[in-house]
Image (cartoon, grey):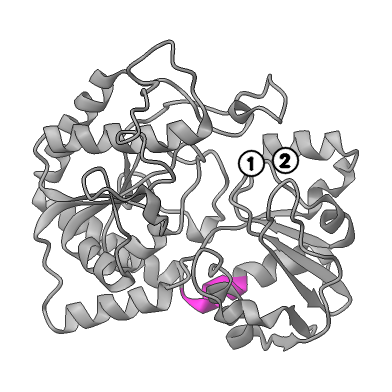
Amino acid sequence: MSSVLIYEPELMSQRGFNGFYRHFLSALVDCVGAKGTDTPRPLPRLTKPREHESCWTRWGEHWVFFDMSDHVQLFDVDALQLCSVYFKANLNRAVAGRILQEHDVTDCEPKLAPFLFFSEGLDDFMRDGRSRRFWRLDRPKYDLCFVMGVYENLVRDGGKSPFVFAEEPITSASYHFWIRWHIMQALQEAEIPGFYRLTSRANRVLEDKVTVHMNLSRRKFSRCISDGRMTMVCTLPHALFPWKASESFVLGRPIVIEQAPLTETPEPFMPVAGLHYLELLPETGAFNQNVPLTEAVSHRVLSRIPLDRFRERAEWLRGVLSDRQRMVEMSVACLEFSKRAYHKTTVAEYISDEVHRRIGS
């Protein structure tokens, strides 16, 4: 087996929004004997057009790159040309193909491998789940945990929803807020018992304690998930599974998403529709491949949804949640899935297999 080196090994100890390296890098340490190195990474981290999260490893004579940007249209093209394997956490082949063609590097396409976001606190959530089951404290108190971070407080600030006002332009930022707001309103109007909260993502300026509240601590958030039968996880407008999905699964709770992601999830980590997750707004929209990549609709789902559709699907979800036996079966399935999918052996084997398949050793 080739020696494996991890550049910037301090990434394994980072927490917060860029803590998603910890689980998979520690899996490489534990399972394939990877070691950290103080040698500088071969290329500097990209900062334009925006900060680009990434990580380098070295497998023998081959560079392996992990692109952890949550923007499907952002690639580090220089890294793609240098490396032998390019893992991207939200890979959409159509968008990737356009990027590679635009930069005249289509010969690099075989290097691309799908990846995903692991929660930075995954081990902590696993421990929470085991402790609650041991002490018989793993009993739902309500149907739905709805805790969503937002970047704006458009209700307080008098913003107009593009779902209500047809003349209101849709932007990626406004869509991010309003789809969360309208779904929350519809679920509450359907009288689905739950814990409902929009949070500020630590931006205290947004907090008015009416529309947007302060962040929950990790332990409080974990408790809120366990107290629900299902967890609401927003996949739009980014159209990917965020790391909250893994947090819910390890606590044995299935998730509700708006729409199945348009980005690839590697097979070992792919949950099953109807068993591990439900779609609240199936077939809502797709990326528009007929516009320039500089436009948000080329890499975001920005479809207008009638308010009646939110209400209709909230009523549907209430009916599903009333089937308590199905909820129990889904919970058990999620727990079993997470034990297998997020085990460090599974993570390390997936990475190793993809690397060796591409470098031919």
Determine crowd level at label 2: few under 14, some 14-19, many 20+ residues with C-alpha closer than 10 A. Answer: some
Horizontal side of residue 287 vs 217, given as left or right: right
Look at the numbered disc 2 and give the secondary structure of its residue: helix
Which residue is drawn at the image coordinates 84% and 62% (left, top)? 83
Determine which quarter of the picture holds residue 243: bottom left
| Residue position marked by numbered label 1 in the rendering | 92
| Residue position marked by numbered label 2 in the rendering | 96
For the record, the magenta segment spans 343-349
Question: Where is the C terminus found, in terms of image quarters?
Answer: bottom right
Would you say the residues marked 1 and 2 are in contact, meaning their CB atoms lie under 8 Å apart? Answer: yes
**Residue 348 forms part of the magenta stretch:** yes
Task: Find residue 353 and report its horizontal and vertical position in percent.
Answer: 68, 68
Which residue is drawn at the image coordinates 43% and 10% (left, top)? 167
Horizontal side of residue 329 vs 268, given as left or right: left
Task: Find residue 125 and report its horizontal and vertical position in percent.
Answer: 34, 73
Question: Where is the N terminus found, in terms of image quarters?
Answer: bottom right
* Real-space CA distance between mark 1 and mark 2, rounded to the nearest whole angstrom: 6 Å
